Structures are given as structure tokens and as C-alpha cells.
Amino acid sequence: MTTHTTLGFKAFDVDEHYYEAPDAFIRHIDPAMKKRCMQWAEIDGRKRFMVAGKVNKFIPNPTFDPIAKPGSLEDYFRGRNLEGRDIAAMFGELDPLDHHPGFRDRAARLELMDRQGLESVLLFPTQGVGMQEALKRDIEALHAAFSAFNTWLDEDWGFDRDGRIFAAPMLTFADPELAVAELERLLEMGARIVCTVPGPIPTGSGYQSPGMSDYDPIWARLEEAGVPMAMHAGLNGTVQYGRVWEPSRGQFEAFKHMAFPLVAFSDRSISDTFAALICHGVLDRFPALRLATIENGAMWVPDLLRNLKICHGKMPWEFKRHPVEAFVENVWVSPYFEDDMALIKDCIGADRMLFGSDYPHAEGLAEPASYLDDIAGFSDDEVRKVMRDNAYELLSASAR
């Protein structure tokens, strides 16, 4: 397995995570909003995370203690589970959280990054990416919760204190006016990148495309600031599509996988989001916008680009520029380590590919730099772009 010493330079990992502190959503919440947002409760002797007064099961153990070892599910995600082991068994022995101080403490994380040969990381939520859907029926509470969370995030991790850890605050588009106000606050706090989940935007009574003109003030401000929007995998309105086929399915729970959704629509959210952004004109109206797709894989990209090309051939008047060109120019993609890297490079070029390990999650890599093994056929110049330079280019317009 590759180690960081094989690279010859320090890498930039665009998909790393923290495990949220117990008070991440609570420390700075308006007391008047607390019951409508997040709380802890003890039920049957176990600590439960409550959202909008209901037990939330997005994370099976929301205390994160004990926690799975990084990369413990790598074989599962590489399709190497032909003997049919249960996912719970594949997790193996869990670790006490205090064995991994870098998962919650910034100074310890920097020391860990040094040992792993990482110069910089983009840092994303674990629990946070499931919260928009949990509060979709109370838009005011949703915005209040995310604003409180972002204040905690900057306090504990920092949006950009030293050019090494870039923690991405969460932004929901649910109320465009509140979203712009929060974005302005985040920019004043020094955010270099912001994060949302792909999928249709909750409106309180339903959903609609992020490409609708209602959200143009958000896209316009991001373009003006040069700050990228990262579309990071998370729970979103696309889950409704699954219930059309399987109406008996209950609340989403991480790692409770079923065959049909895995085959039929695991890429639905991210592919449809970029189809909407392009077909509904966001990249025509805001041609300098920078977008990144993180922890969504990349095997959906060839099909999307093929369909965009066919659509343009049938109705070119729908686009101000070729939609494939728009995607390749404006979107950076972080493939899963198990993806066909050569195919993705053929589609978008090495200039738009980003190294992301999903560390320290069980479904990520135990050693982030081992991602290099999966781009073994790339030239030295391409390797440096994927493992480092492209990430800095993504952030370059947001430098203060």
C-alpha cells in the first residue's frame, strides 16, 4: 500500500471529516428555537439525538463512541464481499473515541495530518449532512440550526486559520433570503468554501430545483466572492423517490443498505442536481461559479455528459454554451477510490479531478495517501494535480 512518502510532496485531501461534538448544534442555538431544533434525550438507557422532537436515526450511534476504525469497510465498497459477510461484522472491533483525539480536536488533527503527509484538508460534517431533511418542514428552525452549527464549527475547527484545515460551513437554500444573510456572515468570518447536500431544495411544503431563479441571489454572491460550493453527499429529498418504489421503507439509517436503491438510484441525487443546475441555466447565468462534488463518486459523470450532449444536439437553444463544456469548466469532481479513474479522466480531464479519502469514516481509506494506488496509470504531472494542485486551484479565487 502507498504511503505519503511515495508521493514526494504533501497532498491536499478534499474529503475529510470530523465527528461532531455533542453540543455542535446546541452550543449557540437561540434558546427560543431549541425545542424545534436539536436536543439530547436518554431513552431506555441510551443517549438519543432528537431533531424536531423526534429520535433521529441518521447516525446509528450519534455519540460516536465507540467508533469504527477508518477504512474498515473498504473491501465492502470495493465489491470484495463475495462471501456475504454482514456489514456489522465487517466493521470489526470498535475503538473508544478518545483513542482518536484528532477526530474531534483541531491541534491533534494537525499532528495526524503531518503523520499522514497531508498539507491541507477540506473538512466536512458527519452528522450535519443529514439534518436538512430532518428539519425540512420547519424552515425557520432549519436555518437557525445551521447558523448555530456554523458558529460552533468556526469556534472548534476554524474556516481557515492557517491554510491547512478548511472547514466547510453548511448552507441550506430553503429560505433564499435567510441563506444570503447566512452566506454574508460566513464570508465575513472567512469561509473559503461552503457546503450543501445535493438534491431538490425543501420549501416547507415540497421541493424544487436549486436551478430555479429564486436561488439566484445565493449563486450570484458565491460567484462574486469566488467561493466554491461543495455538493457533499447527504440525506435529501431524493429519498422520496425511493418511497415510490418501496413505500414501506422507514427513516433512513446509515449502513442499512438494500439492493434495489443501491442499484437503481444511488447516483440519482448528484446526477440530477447537476442536470438541474445546467438545464435550468445556473451555469449560464453565473459562468464563473465554482462547484465541487464531494463523496458522490464519479461513475455518474459519463452518463450525465452523454445525456447533456444529446440534449444539446436536439435543442441547442436551451443553452448559452455547450452543457458539457459548462460542466467541465465549472465543476471539480472527487471520484470514489473504487471508481474507474481512467474513464473519469477521459470524460473531464485530470485538471478537474480531486483526491478525497473520506477519512476517518469506515467507508473511506485507512491511509488517505493510498488513494494514489488507484491512479497508478496517471502521469507524474497528473498525479500531482489530482492529489494536490487541483484543490488549491478550486480555492484560489476565494483567497483573501
Image: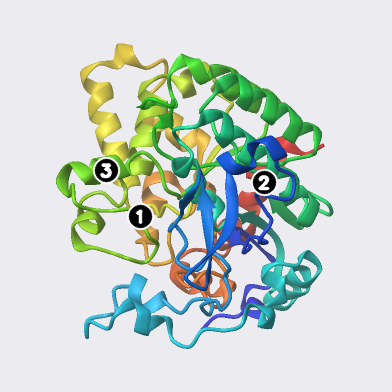
Closer to us: 367 or 69: 69
- Quarter of the picture containing the C terminus is top right
Mark on residue 303?
A: 3
Q: Position of residue 153 (x, y in %)?
A: 72, 50
Q: Nearer the viewer, mark 3 or mark 2?
A: 2
Dot 1 lies on which element?
loop
Real-space Cα separation, disc 3 to disc 1, in angstroms: 27 Å
Dot 2 lies on which element?
helix
Judging by the rendered image, the residue that carries numbered circle 1 is: 252
Dot 3 lies on which element?
helix
Q: Which residue is outermost to the front?
A: 44
Closer to us: 329 or 161: 161
Question: Would you call the spot at circle 2 few (<14 residues within 10 Å), some (14-19), or many (20 or more)?
Answer: many
Q: Is 148 situated above or below 307?
A: below
Q: Position of residue 344 (x, y in %)?
A: 38, 53
Q: Position of residue 367 (x, y in %)?
A: 57, 77
Name which quarter of the figure residue 236 lies in.
Answer: top left
Judging by the rendered image, the residue that carries numbered circle 2 is: 149
State which tag comes first along the sequence, 2 or 1: 2
Q: Nearer the viewer, mark 3 or mark 1?
A: 1
Q: Is 385 situated above or below 115?
A: above
